[in-house]
Structure formats: C-alpha cells, structure tokens
Image: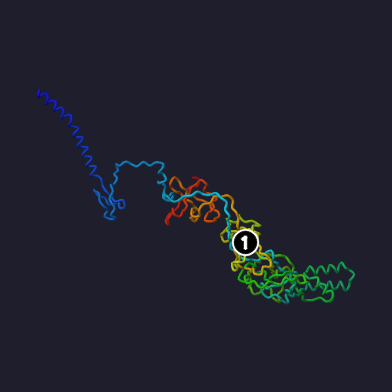
Amino acid sequence: MRKSWKNKLLWLLVLLLPFSFTGCNEAGDGAEAANDIQYTCPMHPQIVRDEPGSCPICGMDLVAKQTADAPAIAISSDLEYLLQPANQAVVSGIETAQPVQKQVQQEITMSGVVTYDTRRQYIIPARFGGRIEKLYVQFNFQPIRKGQKLYDIYSPELVTAQKELLYLLENDPSNSSLINGAKQKLRLLGATAGQVEQLIRSGRETYTFSVYSPYSGYVLDPAVAASPSPVATATPAAPATGGGGMGGMGGGATGTGSSASPPIPSGGFSIREGMYVSTGQALLKVIDASQVWAQFNMPSSQAGQLKKGTPISITFNQLPDKTVQSEVNLVEPVYEAGENFAQVRASLPAGNTSTLIGQLITGKVTYNTGMSLWVPKEAVLDIGTQSVAFLNNNGGFKPISVRIGGSADGMVEILSGLSAQDTIAVNAQFLVDSESFIRVADNNR
C-alpha cells in the first residue's frame, strides 16, 4: 500500500517538472528583456544609457529607446498629408478664409507728361529751289503767328514765272486764259494773292521773294524732336493768335515725326542765310500748341479696362490743387526695351495757359469690375515667376498657382486658380521662410 502511494507521488512530480522549467524560462526572458531597455535623449540621440537619468548636454530626461521588436504604428489615410515633402505641403493651424465673389470699384493711377499733339505739327517745305537771302526766325521754339515772315529767298524759277505774267499783261492783255494761267502758276509756287496783285501794280519782277508762315505756333527745325525735352519743357510765352492777312507761301502738309537725320543743336536751324535749298526740301516745322496731349504709361494688364471715351481725372504734380477732367482718346499697346506696356492719351482743354510742355501729371480712372473672386492681399504670395496661394487640403496646406488681377481695399482679384468653394490660408507669408523653395502643386488637384 505504501509502495503504491510512492509510485503515484513519483508520477506527479514527473508531470509537474516541465511546467517548472517553462516558468523559469519566462521569468528569465522577462528579466533579459528588462535588462535590454536603453534610454536616450530626444535632442541628442548619441547619448544612450542603460538606466533612466538626465542628458548630460541639455539636462532633459532620458526616454526609453524603441527596439526593433516594437509594434509599428499604422498609417491611415487621415495622416497622408503629414507624409508630403516639405517643399510641397505645410502643416499649420493658421487662420483660413474662402474667396468672396463680389463687384469692386477700382481706381487706376497713371504717371504721365504733357506733350504736343502730333496732329498739329506742320512741315513748311520749299515750293521751289533757290538761295536763302535772309532768315527771320532765329531759334527753336520761337513763337510765331500766322502770316509772319519766315525768310526771303532768291529763285530763278520764281523770277521766270513773274516775267511770264508781266509779258502777257504787256503784250496780250486780252488773253485772259493765258494771264489767269500765269497767275495760277505763281500761286502754285506759293505766292499769295496779295503778292500777285503787288506784282501787277508795280509792273516789275522782284528777285527776292518773301515766304510767310501759314500757321501759328512754335517754329523749330524739322530734325528736332517735338517730344518733351529740357528745351521743350521751358515753353516760351504763348504765341499771338491773330491771323495775318497774307497766306503762307510755304505749303501746308502736316507732319507727324522728325526726319531721320540726327538732331541739330537746339539753338539754331539747319538752314542758314546764303544756303541753297531744293524743291520739296523740309525747311521748318511749326507746332500748334493751342491744344496739347496728356500722355500716360500703364501696365498692359490693366489696359483692357480703358477705351476711347473713358473719363479721366488729371492732376498736375506742381499744382496739386488743380484738376482737369478729360476723356481717353487713345489706348496704344507698346513694346519697347523688352517690356510690354500701354500708352494712354487724353486731350487737355485749349487756352490753358498754365499747362507747360514736359510738365509731370497724374491721371486717375475709376471703373467697376464684374463679378469675380477676391481674397485678402496677404493670402497671395509673389515668388517671382508666379503668384501662389496655400490651399487647405485635409489639415495641411499646399501651394497652388493663381493668376491675379487688380487690387482694392486690401483685397486682390483672382482671375484663375481658385474657386469659391476653396479654403486658403489668410496669410501666405507665415507658411514660408527665407530658405524655403516652394514647389507649386498641379492646379487640377
């Protein structure tokens, strides 16, 4: 009986023995795992310790270093915006806003200058060849009036035409057809009706013939540009407006530009007393300054808001209290020195004695825009080659390219790149720093 109990106890010990070894292994593994934990500094990962403590560099508490056997953190679609490259997306809690669709009254301010009306520039050519005997105008921008004597000229051609008329009057006075033809020839050469009558009364030809101005204004050499210059800015006193009784002998084709020859000194003319001139040669230019232009330059992007007849308010920089109302006469696109811009012209009222050529002026045009999207001006960042705004994308912000229009009251117009449903950062400057390189996202999103 006792032997039977001993056998049972022996078999029980045999059965419990494996469980005791398993428990020892688990305890050993736990102790070994506890001994494998290392501690490091979050700011200085080169500091590694086997027990908790403080970082000898910064004094921060050491934290347990994650082992390779630690479970990985699962990344869901909600965290995808955190995995974007740093130059393509920004994570921030900055204030956001949506574009507002509205109509805004805008004002365009342009800088300009007072210049001559090129439609009132006249060339006085030589109707016949000859020699200048005496010149009665001395310097550029000298004021003259209509009918004022310009120069005396000797011309064999004109002397011959006078002799033909006198011969017909003396030898065939009844032949009115030939006599009228001779008179007409003199008038076509530039002689006035008074000069022809004087020739008939005297019965003697004149070898020196006087040429009179057919216009009032300022006289200058044809080679001198009439655009504002240091010479033109100091405009002399306004010329007399009276019209003399004698018509011009110098012809009257209008001219709009200077010749191709280089400009001469501003103090004199290219023609001189004793100089021979040929038929059709441009001798003098007359500019009528009774009406002048206000000429402005403006960006080509804003030129579409102006058209002929648009009201414009003009202020003189030297006389800030003086304002003149006018209308746009011309909007001309210009490409010059590699830049695109537009020239705007408006006529200044005649008889304005305080308006000087070359005077600096400022023009203002007010207009209403159509319905368009507007965002705060700080929400758009100019990166040189384009403008960008930061679009809110599931908690992060990504830069997208936008095309802007005008600006008013701290807002800027968005022409393309955003919709009314988009949400953008109110201040784009807060999302970049001086060393950032922004990679603009595809606007198709």
Q: Residue furthest top?
A: 1
**Residue drawn 30% across the image and 42% down it:** 70
Residue 99 lies, in percent from the top left, at 51, 49
In the displayed image of the protein, which residue is found farthest to the front?
Answer: 321
Q: How is the image coloured?
A: rainbow
Looking at the figure, which quarter contains the N terminus? top left
Residues 323 and 148: in front is: 323
In the rendered image, the residue lying farthest to the right is: 174
Quadrant of the rendered image containing residue 219: bottom right
> How many circles with numbers are drawn on the protein?
1
The answer to which quarter of the image holds residue 321 is bottom right
Task: State the image coordinates of residue 384 (x, y, percent, origin top left).
Answer: 49, 56
Q: Which residue corresponds to the image point at 45% horizontal and 52% vertical from the top-left?
A: 438
> At 50% across and 55% down in the image, what residue appears?
377
Nearer-the-camera pick, 356 or 316 = 316
When the figure is inspected, residue 424 is found, relative to residue 215, above or below; the finding is: above
Q: Specify the amino acid type for callout 1.
A: Ser
* Label 1 packing within 10 angstroms: few (<14), some (14-19), many (20+): some
| Left or right for 381, reference 305 | left
Q: Position of residue 434 (x, y in %)?
A: 43, 57
Q: Residue tagged by mark 1?
A: 313
Is label 1 in a helix, a strand or a loop?
strand
**Rendering coords of residue 274 (x, y %):** 71, 76
